[in-house]
Structures are given as C-alpha cells and as structure tokens.
Image (tube, coloured by chain):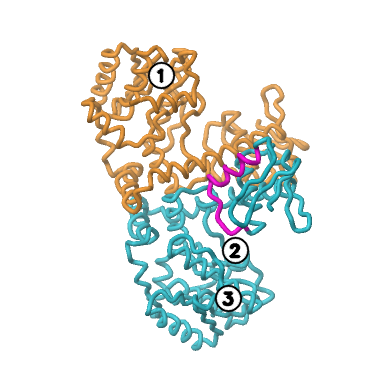
Chain colours: A orange, B cyan
Amino acid sequence: MFEKLEQELKNIINLENKPKIILGLSGGPDSVYLFLFLNKLAQEDKIELICAHLNHEWRTEAIIDVEFCKNLCAKNNIKFIAGKASELEIAIKFNGSLEEIGRKLRRYFFNKILKQEDANYIALAHHLQDQQETFFWRIIRGTTLKGLSGMKMLQEAYIRPLLNIEKKDILDYLDKNNIKYLIDYTNYSDKYLRNRIRKYVLPALEKVDSRFSKKFLTTLNFLQEEEAFLNKITENNFNIIFKNINNKYTGNLTEFKKLDIILQKRILIYWLDKIKVKFTASNSFLLEILRFLNNPNGGKHKINQDFSIIKKQNNFMVL
Amino acid sequence: MFEKLEQELKNIINLENKPKIILGLSGGPDSVYLFLFLNKLAQEDKIELICAHLNHEWRTEAIIDVEFCKNLCAKNNIKFIAGKASELEIAIKFNGSLEEIGRKLRRYFFNKILKQEDANYIALAHHLQDQQETFFWRIIRGTTLKGLSGMKMLQEAYIRPLLNIEKKDILDYLDKNNIKYLIDYTNYSDKYLRNRIRKYVLPALEKVDSRFSKKFLTTLNFLQEEEAFLNKITENNFNIIFKNINNKYTGNLTEFKKLDIILQKRILIYWLDKIKVKFTASNSFLLEILRFLNNPNGGKHKINQDFSIIKKQNNFMVL
C-alpha cells in the first residue's frame, strides 16, 4: 500500500542513514495516515520516528486530542512529545487570522523540538486538497507566482510526503481499515475562508470537470518549475550584487539599478529574508524601498522601529 | 462615463495620429458597449472606426446578428464589413473545440480586414470575467505561468480596452440607457466547459469572498509582470544562441545546453513560433526535442510531415 509513498519519500530525502523524523501529529485523518506510513518505516528500522503535538489551548476538548495522540504512539512504541502554546517563550508578532497564528505557533514548536531532539526532518501531513485550498485562498487575497506555486515536498527541514495524495484516498484507506481518527469540527465552520473554499469552490471545480484534481497537479508542477527558475536567477544576481562583510550584506547600487524591477523586488525579499527582518514585505512596501534606492540622493529610509536602509556612495545596506 | 476607459486606451496606444481601428462586433453586450465607446471617439474625430462581423454559419439565426450589427453601424455612420466563414480561403488545421475553431476563424478574418483596410488595430471586447473564465479553464486543462497570465490589453495588433471592466458594469450601463444588444443562448448551455465555469465556479468564488474580482486582478497583474520578465530573458537568450542566416535560424548547441531546462523549453517555443510551425507544442513534445538535442549523437528528428530538426556539428536547425 505505502510502496509508492516510500518511493516519493526516497526522491526527496536519503533513507540510507536512518534519518530522525519529527511528525506533527494532530490526531486528524491526514496526520494519522502519515503516522501509519512513517510508523511502518520505523518498525522496518528505516527511520527513527518521534511524534510531536502542540495544544493551542483554544478549545477545552483539546486535551482529548493530546490523549488520543499519546495513546496512538504508546501502542506503537513511538516517542511522543506534547507541548502547550502557553509554555512557548516566543516573540512572534501575532498578526493575521487565527489560522495563521496557529501555523506560526506550530512552526515555532516543531523547530524547537527539531533542535532539542537533534532530528533531521519535520514531517507534515499536507495533501493535494490543502494545496488546492491554499492556491484559491491566495487568489482570493491577491498573490504572485510564488504564492500560487504552493508548498513543496521538501522545504528546508520540512517534508510533506502526502502532497500528491487526494484527501478522499486518505479517508477511504482509514475507513476501510477501521482506523480511528479525530474530527475537528471547526473544519466545517463557514467562518473561515479556507473552509468556505473547501465547501463551495473545490466542489464547483470538480463538478464542472472531473479532470480538475489531476490537471491542477500538472499546473502546480509547471508553476513550481518556473518559480524555482526565478529563484535561481534571483540568488545568482543577489550573489553578484551583495558582498557579505562581517555578517553585514552591502549591495552595489549601480549593479542593482541595472536589473529588471521584477528581479529587484525578488532580490529585496531575498535580502530581507537573509537578514531575518521579522515581517512579510508587501508589494507597496517593496515599491517604496525601490523608489528610495532609485532616487539619486543619498540618505536613510526607516523600514520599521528596528531597521533602516541607508545609501552611502554607491552602496546600500541596513542599519 | 467613458473618461477612465479613454485614459486606459491612451496608456496602450497613441491617439494623436488618429489610428484606424477595426472593432470585432458580434452584437452581444460586450461588443456593443465597446462600440459605444469607440463610436464616441470616432465622432470626436480621435480615431477612425470600422466594424467587422464574421458569420460562422453555424446557426440559422446568425443572419439576424449580421443585420443587427449592420443597422447599428448604419445609424451611426460607421463603415461595416461582414464576412462568412465559408468564404475564407483558409488552411488552418481545425483541431480543438468548436470554441477554439471559432476563435481561429475570427482571428484569421480580422487579420485579413486589418491588412485590406490598412488599419492599425483590431479591438476586441474581452472583459474581466473573460479573463477569469480563461484562467480557470486553463487550470482545469493544465497550464503554465504563460497560460495563467491571461490576455493583455495590447498584444501585437490586438487591443482589449475592457479587460479591467466587470461584466455586470457593462450590463448595468446598457440596461440603464435602454441600449439593445443580442443574447447568445449558447452562452447558457452546460455543454461547454467555459459556460460551466461561468455558471458554477465564478459564483462560488464570489460567494466565499466578495473581494475575489478585485484581488483576482491584482494576482493577474503580478503574473503578467513575471511572465513578461521571463519573456525578456527568453528573447535575450534566443538572440545569443541563434544566428539568422538567409532567413534560417541556426542555434548553437553548446550555448543551448548550458541553459536551465525552463529556459530551453521557452526558447524552443519562441523559435518554433518565429519559424511559424503551425501547431501548439505540448510539454511532452518539447521534452522529446530536448532529449534529441541533449543526446551526444548527431542526426535528424522529424517533428511532423513538414518539419524536422537536424543537428550538424555544434549547431541545430530545422530542415
């Protein structure tokens, strides 16, 4: 059953050194399915598996979820680590929807466990419908190629082996094999845009053409290839323009100004990401910086309370 | 009323030389709306307007459409040219859906009139909902960034001044001003994928978030910028790799092989388009050519009955 999945996993990570993998286990069908697969690999001694669960402490029933995950691991002799959001000493700025905050908290928690356990990867159970929801969620909010190209199977330490699998195949498998999982009733609420996309937009697309899911994956693969190519160009040009002196990146203004605006924007994002500026740059923000950099006068431009960009002779850097 | 539209038109074409514009007039609401706008400019002596209508001869009622368009033009003193599909001496290969064949026939007809009348532009009444339909139509069939980036306001001799206008604003205007237009009942048939998208997918998106249309336009603009940037890189690299000798393009294999596969594919499409190969290259077709070009042996690869690609020493060309 899991042969194809094992092949896909081998395409993205090396199983020969028996990697240590942290699975983000919520107790929902997707993560239980991924647990079954990774647990099989663990029993075959191909990987070392640890499960991690974060209690956001938003719902009183959350304690049931923790117990469910703990028992599943105990029965299979898998190490289980539970955390509480309130116990994370964390300085993330809590902008955005509840969903986004939840995602940031989990990401912080998993990264902490990764370090603490000296593990290699964090496995998440995102599947094809999650890609579809994200795609349409982003179209509805306005996005770029990067936004549309979605999650990747391997992204830094994160692996998502189920990305090409359809939700209905996951549910079919669990139900046929009488495997228990938790149902998160907030998934059904019309309050969240993502849920409304799942309930109304995806079924409409399936209804108008049954090829939708298959062809969506084709589209996504093309977009990912094109996005990866643009990233490569961005990185090459970043390395030409910036010099790293004492861990400070200094950019050459003349070289920067020669580039297409698309590349200038991408290089700014790449740079701000490298120096770990803690916010997501909006398009108008990027245009504001570009206006400053293209202005012939020197000077200083305040980004936020922590950062300013300065121009000095033919160079620019952050202060 | 039409001030904003006139400004947008001025952004893409020069009105100072009083350009001659052929309007593709079907008699439907969109082209009638565009007629009103262009007719106003013609009455103000800012452009020269000619209307052209192609009867596909698929429906017996089609003759009513011709009469409607003819009358609208006569009343406003605008030159009107009608054509019949059966009278076009045409060698287009009729692949694809009825919709696609219709589009190819109209395009051939408009290009013929453009030449014959020594005109500058062909104006078409595509609007924002057409962009949306095309976007989702392509996702459902599988596409690339180019496919998603949609139609442009100015594309060779074609102008589409209504691209940022919503269908409902067009209908509101016509109905408020008691302006007659034709209704094409095939637009309501569930037989066509495009119609099903219009009836089921777009309303679902509007329902889940009222910002959809506005944000869709933001997304489209980003994708168009990114696609234009990739086109620029493609063209630059094409000019490095290919030499034009006696109207034959000869490519340098060593230089070609250095490029990223994404760029190789785009350059092949650009090249096949330049030498007017009369078919749309599928991804598997492109990969087949790339395998041939990257193979160390020389030789010849047949594309179709008219074309072959040959490798000779360090060059490649078509035969």
Residue visible at 47% across and 59% down? B131
Q: In the rendering, which numbered label is found on residue A183?
A: none
Give the mark nearest the N terminus, 3 or 2. 3
The residue type indicated by label 2 comes to Leu
Name the chain letter of the residue that bears numbered label 2: B
Can residue A304 be seen by looking at this rendering?
A: yes
- Secondary element at tag 1: strand
Crowd rating for badge 2 (residues with CA inside 10 Å; few <14, some 14–19, many 20+): some
Q: Residue at x 40, y 28 (%)?
A: A4
Q: Residue furthest left?
A: A178
Region rendered in magenta: B277-294
Identify residue type, mark 1. Ile
Which residue lies under the disc numbered 2? B154
Q: Eyeballing the image, is B50 above or below A138? A: below
Q: Nearer the viewer, residue B199 or B37?
A: B199
Tag 1 residue: A22
> Alpha carbon of mark 3 to alpha carbon of mark 2: how far?
14 Å
* Local SS, label 2: strand
Say which amino acid is labelled 3: Ile
Q: Position of residue B210 (x, y in %)?
A: 37, 54
Q: Mark 3, residues whose alpha carbon is within 10 Å: few (<14), some, or many (≥20)? A: many
In the rendering, at what x and y percent does residue A312 appear? 75, 35
Mark 3 or 1: in front is: 3
Secondary structure mostly taken by the magenta-highlighted segment of the chain: helix
